[in-house]
Amino acid sequence: MKLINMFSRLTRPSTVAFICRGFSSSPSLFQVSSHTDAHQHHMNCKVAVLGASGGIGQPLSLLLKRSSLISQLSLYDIAHTPGVAADLSHIETRPKVSGHMGPEQLKDCLTGAQVVIIPAGVPRKPGMTRDDLFNTNASIVRDLCQACTEFCPDAMIGIVTNPVNSTVPIASEVFKKNKVYDPNRIFGVTTLDVVRSNTFIAEAKGLDVSKVNVPVIGGHSGVTIIPLISQATPPLSFPQDDRKKLTVRIQNAGTEVVEAKAGAGSATLSMAYAAARFTTSLLEAIGGAEGKIECAFVRSDETEAKYFATPVLLGKNGVERNLGIGKLIEYEVNLLKEAMPELLANIQKGEDFVRQS
Ligand code: NAD
Ligand code: LMR
């Protein structure tokens, strides 16, 4: 029962009412059935997962293999993808699965992909910050994005690899360098921060978690993660002390998992769930569903930071509208002030890396 609930959550509409107006997109993309729910339509969408053999990549690919919105699931890694693909391909669901291993197979993996999700790269061990992953992961993201600019320049790119505050600027600079940059198509996946906030806050208030939505803005590391509890649905009030404790727990939730795993990596299963939720919303929006909103770390004019996570309305071409940071209470204004120096430095570091390489 729990499992069924988990999967239904993946296709549940986000914060605003979901209205399916039927698909007006090109018939080559969609085979429209008589059902009214977007997720029951069969879209012909190719989705690629880069880093598909990893702790996140495998369960994410499994969750995506359940989606009728996907016609082809294309799995890439530097190791083990033939096995992962063979295994998944036996599952009795719609997406055809292909496995690709090594850079010479990136062309086949990426050609025709409309959505590319990137969880390739090393995770943290206890005592490390996300920024400590920069030296290894920056070049991995740079090189994979370079391949995307060559083989699927119009794809939507969802970046999971840490440090997200830097890897999104890296991806963006690579697309700019190759003159195929569309800021509306590059997303840092911060959905896990929202998922955690929903869980912790529903627990604290004894609420049905499926009815709770807490926007999270800023970036994806420590103090740059800014949960907006004042904007929660349903509206909730907390004594200041409890608000602070919850905020700190949300900011440190990644570290909570890193420490519990004691050297065996960071969040993988909750992250796979979060990335599948984000990908599903994006696919539904590409398919014409209205009102699909997810928080994501995107190119932004909302603050002085060039990249900033806010709720964004998704559409056929990616970010349709940035919904902004909304009205903050004083405590949240201070969180934003505290976040800015680290966020700006992380962004600069990512941009410098590509400009200098
Ligand atoms: P993992 O080590 O289990 O898996 C990473 C995979 O990437 C491995 O299969 C590896 O072979 C592959 N890989 C390495 N270099 C590659 C390359 N050049 N091309 C393709 N694949 C390559 O790690 P994981 O637990 O899956 O975490 C992956 C990343 O996601 C880490 O950087 C981690 O910090 C990050 N992460 C982000 C969030 C988030 O909220 N955005 C949450 C959790 C983890
Ligand atoms: C998370 O938030 O779980 C990820 O960013 C992984 C990490 O290193 O904490």
Image: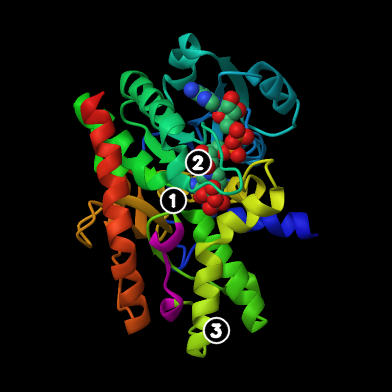
Q: How is the image coloured?
A: rainbow
User: Which contiguous range is marked in magenta?
Assistant: 222-231
Is residue 282 a member of the stretch shown in magenta? no
Q: Looking at the image, which residue is at 46% across and 53% down?
A: 190
From the image, tell me which residue sits under label 2. Answer: 32
Identify residue for label 1.
22
Which of the two marks, 3 or 1, is nearer to us in this view? Answer: 3
**Amino acid residing under circle 2:** Val
Please state, as top left, top right, bottom left or bottom right, where the N terminus lies in the image. bottom right
Q: Are marks 2 and 1 in contact (CB under 8 Å)?
A: yes
Image-quadrant location for residue 96? top right
**Mark 3 or mark 1: whose residue is earlier in sequence:** 1
Residue shown at the point (49%, 55%) measured from the top left: 191
In the rendered image, the vertical position of residue 55 relative to residue 147, given as above or below: below
- Mark 1 crowd level (few <14, some 14–19, many ≥20, 10 Å Cα): some
Q: For residue 119, say whether it is visible.
A: yes
List x then y, in percent, for residue 249: 56, 68
Q: Which residue is mark 3?
A: 242
In this orientation, which residue lies closer to the viewer: 76 or 130? Answer: 130
Q: Tag 1, which secondary structure?
A: loop
- How far across and down, in percent of the image, does residue 286 sit? 40, 44
CA–CA distance between discs 2 and 3? 48 Å
